[in-house]
Image (cartoon, helix red, strand yellow):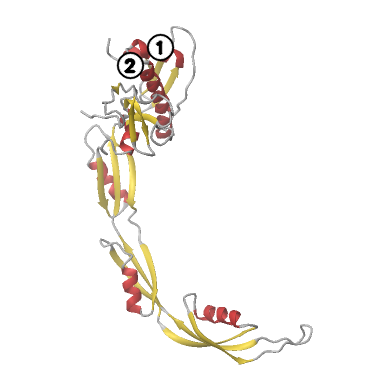
Amino acid sequence: METIVCSKCGKELKRLDNMFREIPDLDLWNGNVCLACKQVYCSECIKVGGPTPCPNCGTPTKPAQRQYLREIGQLAKQNIIEVEAESLDEARKKAKSQIPEGLDIISEEIISDGKPKTVKAIADTTEEAFTKAQGDIPANAHILEKIEVSKPGQKVVIVEAFDEESARAQAANQVGKTAIVNTIRLTIAGKQGFLGVGKKPNQYEAEVFQPAEVNISYKTNAKISARTGKTFRGSLVLIFNETHLLEELKKLGMSEGEAYASLLAAKQAVQTLSYNQKDKLLYTEPITGDNLAIKWVIYHSPEQELLRKSIDDLVYKRK
């Protein structure tokens, strides 16, 4: 049994019924959570059901849903599968083969994509450059290729420029982007000319050092972390009048705060399902009438007809 305790008074938070059992992340406790300072508050220590400011840091809080409690470390990350393979496709197939019966992959984190990568390094010697590059490669990587892009060495180049700063830049560009100009001296002075006519640049001789430059290509296995759980198969059309929904929830024995928190969970479910079912139709439509407090319409698959059930039949089985 999972127990959530209030950070302020130490009392255990009451777990509420999840109207959306197909979405475990929407499991709800009667309280609020502060993601900023990782505090949990019961309904006696904070006004639940809304973005009430955290008593500790003032940040707007969120309902005490499983997804937020897990984010602050109050609940363990359950049903996590980590797998490695040569490619992402193979890793996904491997993860799928390890899923417990009745569950699906509901989220995926790519730790490594398994694609070849290249590390570049420069140093005074080729050996030092390769050592430097090797230090940036994961220990479990497979080396594909080592290339010496340029050998180290001193070079003398002649350049023309109107000043020493420009001469240094030209000398470095002639040798390479990684070149270092050690010394530069004026060999032939240019001419000033008259009113710009006959003006000639100076000639400089530069001693340039070209460091060793190397590339190492490597590859690691693709690695993913997959979270498993139950997924909603189909589309959900949520049709309700908020006022009547709150009344029905209170009739089931919920307090005003609990009912309002459940209403927010219903809205959150719409957003979650809309995100997860991008290729499905999902919308909310308000209705009126005392006898139409809430209706759920679930479309399971193209082969099945629309099933209509009231809140008492579909959501709660208690009397």
Tell me the residue at 26%/53% (across/down).
Answer: 85
The reply to whether residue 294 is in sight is: no
Quick one: quadrant of the N terminus?
top left
Q: Is residue 300 in sight in this rendering?
A: yes
Asked if 97 appears above or below 141 in the picture, the reply is above
Classify residue 42 by image quadrant: top left
Q: Residue furthest top?
A: 290
Which quarter of the picture shows residue 293? Answer: top left
Extreme residue in the right direction:
195
Q: Residue at x 71, y 89 (%)?
A: 191
The spot of residue 228 in percent (x, y) is 28, 37
Q: Which mark is residue 314?
A: 2
Q: Nearer the viewer, residue 292 or 104?
A: 292
Nearer to me, 277 or 207: 207
Q: Residues within 10 Å of mark 2 (few under 14, many from 20)?
A: few
Q: Hey, what amino acid is under mark 2?
A: Leu
Q: Residues within 10 Å of mark 1 (few under 14, many from 20)?
A: some
Residue type beneath disc 1: Glu
Please name the residue that numbered disc 1 is placed on.
247
State the CA–CA distance, disc 1 to disc 2. 17 Å
Provide residue 57's location: percent of width, then percent of height: 41, 37
Q: Report whether 243 appears left or right of 132.
A: right
